[in-house]
Amino acid sequence: MSLADQLRAIFEAERALRRAESELLQGDPQEISALLTQAVVTAKGTHDPAEAELQLTRLADLCAQVPGDAMADAMLAILDEDQPGVRVQAAEALVDVAYDRYAEVARAIERMLSRGDDGPAMQELPWVIAEVAEPSAVALIGRFLLHKNEEVVASAIEALARLGDPSAVAALKKLAKDPRVVTVEEGDEEFTSTLGELAEEAIDALSE
């Protein structure tokens, strides 16, 4: 097969994918939701990392196109993966959905917090919330400040600093003397800091 033939094959495969996706999404929403929910569970149980990534990144896009709390839960389940590529795709999909259907995403996040979940998603979600920047963002991110995992707390502190809402200062002051040590990434570099130091830096930034 020539290079030109290979390129044409790629275009045809893309057209076939779009047709199949369109036909799938024209079905009954409840049946689609149940199907995608189960597909996420199956994909997360796949032992082949490459196959799991392929399925989960596609499922993140599909789940984003179907309204409902079940799909928000499924997207958070996809975000709660160790593979960085999967998390990036899921986070981008969640941000897109949250701009249009914020209540669904917020309720799903609150359910994760109430369960005391401690997976990779918990460090990503404060940034998703800060990116959308709804009026309730400070209160919702503030719940992450109470998490038992110091890395989740650190993520919430940094997300609040990025959000730039001075009303977060009161919650951050409660962490000003927290001695727990975390690893912080800044560009290509990593350094350690206490949660108290991070909180103080965020307070200073929000008080300017």
Image (spheres, grey):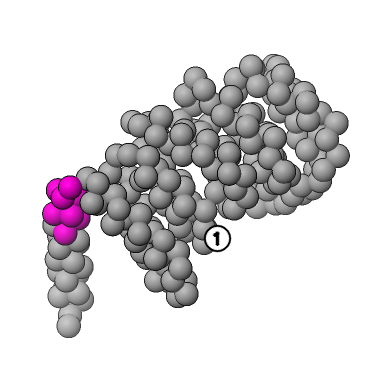
40 magenta-colored: no
Residue 156, percent from left and from top: 64, 36
| Residue 104 appears left or right of 27 | right
Residue 183, percent from left and from top: 74, 49
| Residue 151 appears left or right of 139 | right
**Residue stretch rendered in magenta on the structure:** 20-28
| Residue 176 appears left or right of 25 | right
**Residue shown at 16%/71% (left/top)?**
9
Q: Main secondary structure of the magenta part?
A: helix
114 or 123, nearer to the observer: 114
Kind of residue at disc 1:
Asp
2 or 169, nearer to the observer: 169
Residue 173, percent from left and from top: 77, 23
Q: Which residue is mark 1?
A: 82
**Residue shown at 39%/34% (left/top)?**
104
The quadrant where residue 55 appears: bottom left
**Residue shown at 39%/59% (left/top)?**
40
23 magenta-colored: yes
